[in-house]
Image (cartoon, rainbow, N blue to C red):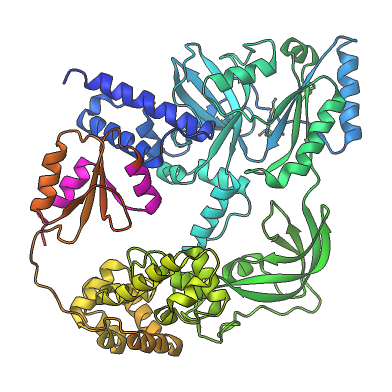
Amino acid sequence: MPGTSSEIEDLRTQLRHHEHQYYVLDAPQITDAEYDVLMRQLQKLEAENPDLVTADSPTQRVGGKPREGVAKAAHSSAMLSLDNALDEMELRAFDARVRELLGGAAYRYVAELKMDGLSLATRYRENTLQQAITRGDGSIGEDVTENARTIRSLPLRVTAERTFEVRGEVIMARKAFERLNTERDAQSLPRFANPRNAAAGSLRMLETSVTASRRLDYYAYFLLDETGGPIFDSHWESLDWLAAQGFQVNRRRRLCDTVEDAIRFCQEFDAERDNLPYEIDGVVIKVDSIPQQRQLGYTAKAPRWAIAFKYAARQAETEVLDVLVQVGRTGALTPVAVLAPQVVSGVTVSRATLHNEDEIARLGLQIGDRVLVERSGDVIPKVVRVTQEGEVRRPFVMPTECPVCGGRVVREEGEAASRCINLNCPARLKESIRHFASRGVMAIDGLGDVLIDQLVEQGLVKSVSDIYALTPEQVAALERMGAKSATNLVENIAASRKMPLPRVLGALGIRFVGERTAELLADEFGSLDRIAGASPEELQGAQEVGPKVAESISAFFREPHNADLVERLRLAGLKFDHVVKKKEGGKLKGLTFVLTGTLPTLSRDEAKKRIEDAGGKVAGSVSGKTSYVVAGEEAGSKLEKAVSLGIPILDEAGLNGILEPSNT
Ligand code: IVH
């Protein structure tokens, strides 16, 4: 089809631009959903025209192409490490040596943050990324090109025609690191000890789609030509050039006229360290002039023109006095070490998180042991390792009853966390209400986070069921509540009594019981009482319910606090019986759609007619009642609103997908 290839190139250019704005400049110009729409258009065109797929297409960032084993590759010139300066005196000594070797000529320094990750060399030829190699032993590294492609802040395409090589640091930002470890807890996999290990492990994965899911970042800090020689006369200029080519170059960098300026930079960022979105372990100070760098040359292991100023370790040794348990919002019990108070780089530390039982086992930790603790960012300190077993030591035992409510504690098979399964546990109550009121569940408009906090903290709601007893006067007396919105809320709560049994079942928040399972259970058993009274074996009689889900449901109803909640909800007048409806009306009956933007083939009237023919409604504006937003090109504020409300978004293909007659 003529024009397709230029359409593809146009989409790629747009996507590259937006990736750069988002991942490198941190200044997105379009919403994620709009980005997704562009990406889907490109994916579709590429799927239809496989010949036109190129390695530098933004679609290639998702990984999937597995690496074929571990291939080694040689570096164009050695990747050296740096000498360290452990204090300001050592920095001044470095400066004195530089001054002497340069024989009185004027010189300047560039100060950059020393990011704590792993170094990676990337080669570009004919405008595209050709190869990425880890440091390895400095002369030979591992070829990780396919993995590197998945790093969103590493350009796959550049404007410069020339051949060049970039060296930089692959890191994992703190947020991505926390998220990864939380996911690993949920899968009972061991946690990564720090972002550097997580980044290194993720980059070297043979399964590149796993690398893609890990959200790595790349910061460029060095530029070479194909022979390992320089391109510019100044390092500062090289960094600016790299930024102009689309690389992420740390903007926290400074041109310094004297070593004292560089020392100030080190001090400033030592104080700022905890507030940065990534971990740093020091500052790298480099002579700016590249002719002068060559004049200074190298020792056997490091350049004479650069030095790494290392920050003091944020670790210290202390004793574990006890291990307590905290109950989180999801009922998860987190063991916390109580420590003999110890100052770690200026801050007194007396507690450290131990995450879960597996982590304690991994550390081999017992109460009474001496441990190394580490402080990083504002987060609660963590135990790195046991340094010495206590003379008197005793193992930590996870309680079988919740320390907050006395409810039963359960550790499901295959889970790292032990949980309090009492839905009314105060620590869980807020989260439970949030779930209960949410859109796909009881859909109570207006019962948001701020309100839930107040209701629980003021003792107005002690059990989820108490919301049905709230009066407009009680609600109106809360902060930031008017009489009108209070009345609306109480009406919305009352209206939720009409929600069908699958919603009520979903609202209980039983682990593994989502919307679909709730419907299948309701269809099979016909009432909540029959579900609650069923044995795990009987529960498995329902479609798609396996032993794990059955056991979870059964354990839920056996817990007396939950049985009590069920009774209260019955008294509040919720629907416990289920009428299995005969399929009537169209497929989209009960669903409300909003159309926005231009669809590739359907006109707006055609799309509207198809939805209405299938029993759906089409509304003009997006609200909490909207089921789907169908978005085409140049979709604007409606799409944004849908994203902010968490309403699912369909493109034309997606709409056709739900209009198509299904097999069941
Ligand atoms: S310059 C010859 N700049 O620190 C140039 N390194 O011990 C050598 N690092 O292996 C590297 N941030 O992995 C340089 N802004 C930065 C850096 C940096 C982190 C790492 C790099 C290197 C190690 C040096």
Q: Quadrant of the N terminus?
A: top left
Image quadrant of ligand 1 equals top right
Q: Magenta residues, as a range?
A: 638-662
Residue 661 colored in magenta in the image? yes
Q: Is residue 137 visible?
A: yes
Is 531 placed left or right of 244 in the picture? left
Q: How many marks?
A: 0
Identify the image quadrant of residue 128. Answer: top left
Q: Quadrant of the C terminus?
A: bottom left
Horizontal placement of 658 versus 285: left or right? left
Q: Is residue 285 above or below residue 366?
A: above
Q: Residue at x 23, y 72 (%)?
A: 519
**Residue 535 lies in what quarter of the image?**
bottom left
Please tell me whether residue 548 is drawn above or below residue 627 in the rendered image.
below
Counting from the top left corner in percent of width and height, residue 237 is at 65, 15
Most common secondary structure along the magenta stretch: helix
- Residue nearer the viewer, 449 or 245: 449
Query: Which of the pair 313/563 is nearer the observer?
Result: 563
Q: Position of residue 367 (x, y in %)?
A: 73, 75
Residue located at (39% from left, 88% from top): 563
- Position of residue 656 relative to residue 126, above or below, is below
Locate residue 591 relative to residue 277 in the image: left or right: left
* Magenta segment includes 569: no
| Pick the front one: 208 or 186 | 186
506 with respect to 230 (left or right): left
Can residue 416 be seen from the camera position used here?
Answer: no
Where on the picture, by quarter, is residue 398?
bottom right
